[in-house]
Amino acid sequence: MAYNLLKGKKGIIFGALNDQSIAWKAALRAHEEGAELVLTNTPVALRLGTLNALAEQTGALLVPADAASVEDLQALVARSQEHFGGKIDFVLHSVAMSLNLRKGRPYEAANYEFFNKTLDISALSFHKLLQVLYERDAMNEWGSVVAMTYIAAQRAFEGYNDMADAKALLESICRSFGVIYGRRKHVRVNCVSQSPTLTTAGQGIAGMGEMFGKADAISPLGNASADDCADYLVTLFSDLTRHVTMQTLYHDGGYSMTGII
Ligand code: NAI
């Protein structure tokens, strides 16, 4: 059901790869709530062509950008502002990549070039994005920037590898930039800590099947799906959450607060 929560709002969504992606579902829900969208992903992801269907379905403009490249981010934000004819109301950073995970290198045998790439793409890119938005004064007052995180930033999950460190840095950047962006421009910056979700990135995590099942069993409400996450994200893009900032917000069916059951 749609409530027109994002009527007249303009947003950029990073990270839709296929119809399982959290960002894909978020784009569909944001469109349903009346938002105008720019969708972005790496040039390689765009060349796959899958995103064309989502762009068509949501009437969005597609702009390629490597989230780790300041130049690409500058071009993306400039193109988006041109397309929207003004400032931006919300941005979703739903981006992560670990070559250590992809190539099956465990944490205790990490390749440091891969490690640096993990941190750059999955965490530092959030700082780069925020800095580009801030320097260009591209966000409307009371705008909202959200990044996706996981509880491995706070607790040890062996299979999560170097991505755990990337998420810890991501959450710290959310607080550190959030205080500046809030004070100076009234822009919100938050992280959503999502349940294990069976997406392309999710399935790349060692032991994901077991992690998904255990979290589902422990969480009083069960795991939150990507569709549930999209609903929650819409509230964070909307005017209904204007004083929520610098938070890691758990969208996990209660998993993070549950002890022995
Ligand atoms: P996904 O694989 O659909 O999305 C990851 C996206 O990152 C892809 O679209 C990929 O193309 C993009 N990406 C990778 N390198 C990039 C780069 N250099 N520049 C721009 N984009 C790049 O998977 P999912 O699960 O939707 O992931 C979205 C976010 O949610 C990630 O930050 C992930 O860590 C987070 N998350 C996922 C959970 C899960 O269990 N699936 C749980 C908690 C958080």
Image (cartoon, rainbow, N blue to C red):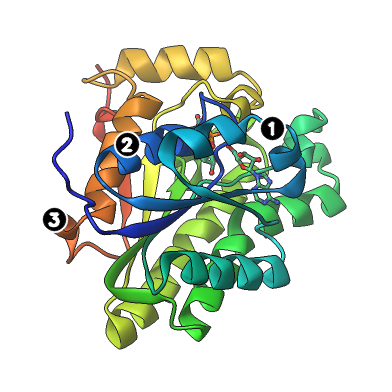
Q: Tell me the amino acid under the disc marked 1.
A: Gly
Left or right of 40, for residue 214: left
Q: CA distance from mark 3 to mark 2?
A: 16 Å
- Residue at position x 70%, y 48% in the image: 42
Q: Earlier in the sequence, mark 3 or mark 1?
A: 1
Residue under label 2: 29
Is the Cβ of the residue at disc 2 closer than 8 Å to that at disc 1?
no
- Residue 49 — which label? 1
Q: Looking at the rendering, which quadrant does residue 30 occupy? A: top left
Label 1: state its secondary structure: loop
Q: Position of residue 227 (x, y in %)?
A: 34, 27
CB of mark 2 near ligand 1 (< 8 Å): no
On the rendering, which quadrant does ligand 1 occupy? top right
Q: Position of residue 73 (x, y in %)?
A: 63, 67
Label 2: state its secondary structure: helix
Q: CA distance from mark 2 to mark 1?
A: 21 Å
Is the N terminus in the top left, top right, bottom left or bottom right quadrant? top left
Q: CA distance from mark 3 to mark 1?
A: 35 Å
- Residue 240 — which label? 3
Is the C terminus in the top left, top right, bottom left or bottom right quadrant? top left
Mark 2 closeness class: few <14, some 14–19, many ≥20 residues within 10 Å: many
- Residue at position x 27%, y 65% in the image: 245
Figure check: 233 above or below 200: below
Q: Is residue 251 visible?
A: no
Q: Position of residue 181 (x, y in %)?
A: 37, 79
Q: Earlier in the sequence, mark 3 or mark 2?
A: 2
Q: Position of residue 113 (x, y in %)?
A: 86, 53
Nearest-to-viewer mark from 3 and 1:
1
Q: Earlier in the sequence, mark 2 or mark 1?
A: 2
Figure check: 119 above or below 88: above
Mark 1 closeness class: few <14, some 14–19, many ≥20 residues within 10 Å: few
